[in-house]
Image: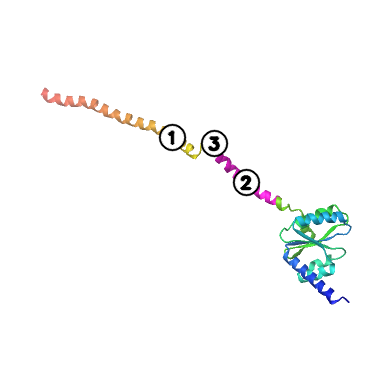
Amino acid sequence: MPSVKVLEEKKAIVAQLVERLNNSVTGVLVSYKGINVADDTALRKELREAGVNYSVVKNTLLSRACEEANLTGLQGTLEGTTALATSDEDYASAARILSNFAKKSKTFELKGGYLDGEVVDMATIDKLAKLPTRDVLLANVLGAFQAPIASFARAIQAIVDKGGVEACAPAEEAAPAEEAAPAEETAPAETAAPAEEAPVEEAPAAEAAAEEPAAE
């Protein structure tokens, strides 16, 4: 029969696992059978650098933790060797790294996982594994924002090359002023012509009216 000290230690481990399961956004269970020390060290390093918490766990203790964390759907996968990889922020890193490692191994395999407190099937884990890394996603978003900014920067540089906004403004205002000048000069010439022709046409009529009484 286990001593009181051993039982307390197991309870503490289960409590830690429950807290880890509840505080993580995603988790993946794997069977690490057949992995050698060198590969295990390299895998742990890659997971650690990606912010993934990876550790070997006992099936009995993890089963109790899953029950307390409402992840009973994972209990059916707790056979053989088991390691748990959890992430508190990144949804895809654990699935992506472990899936890539499993492709190179004949014995290492993914057994199950959960997402936001819900047990998911292997198809969902495979989809997570195919998502790009955080750096790639950020680069794509940044590229989308940089495209219009680059166009705006080129337009500003074009104005600067021409001498600035003040240098460009007079050139645009001068064009309408030059076009308006001929219109102003033409208008007086057209109105002056009738003023000169009117006396010439009225003069003969006035002389004829003055000569008619003299003839009587």
Q: Please indicate whether residue 33 sits to the left or right of residue 179 in the image.
A: right
Q: Which mark is residue 215?
A: none
Q: Count residues near mark 2 (Cα–Cα under 10 Å), then give few for <14, some for 14-19, many for 20+.
A: few
Give coordinates of residue 139: x percent, y percent. Answer: 68, 49
Q: In the displayed structure, does residue 166 sit left or right of residue 100?
A: left
Q: Which mark is residue 146?
A: 2
User: How far apart, in angstroms, are the residues tagged by discs 2 and 1?
Assistant: 36 Å
Q: Earlier in the sequence, mark 3 or mark 2?
A: 2
Residue 63: x %, y % from top left: 82, 69
Which quadrant holds residue 205?
top left
Which residue is labeled 3 in the image? Answer: 161
Q: Looking at the picture, which amino acid does disc 1 mark?
A: Ala
What residue sits 84% from the left and 77% below the top? 4
Residue in view at x 84 percent, y 53 percent: 103
Is residue 210 visible to us here? yes
Sequence-first tag of 2 and 1: 2
Magenta span includes 146: yes
**Is 99 placed above or below 197 here?**
below
Relative horizontal placement of residue 70, taking residue 188 as reference (left or right): right
Please identify the quadrant where the C terminus is shown.
top left
Q: Which mark is residue 174?
A: 1
Q: Which residues are magenta?
A: 136-161
| 164 in relation to 216, above or below | below
Look at the picture and state if 186 lies above or below 96.
above
Q: CA distance from mark 3 to mark 2?
A: 22 Å
Q: Amino acid at mark 2?
A: Gln
**Which x, y percent locates residue 56?**
83, 63
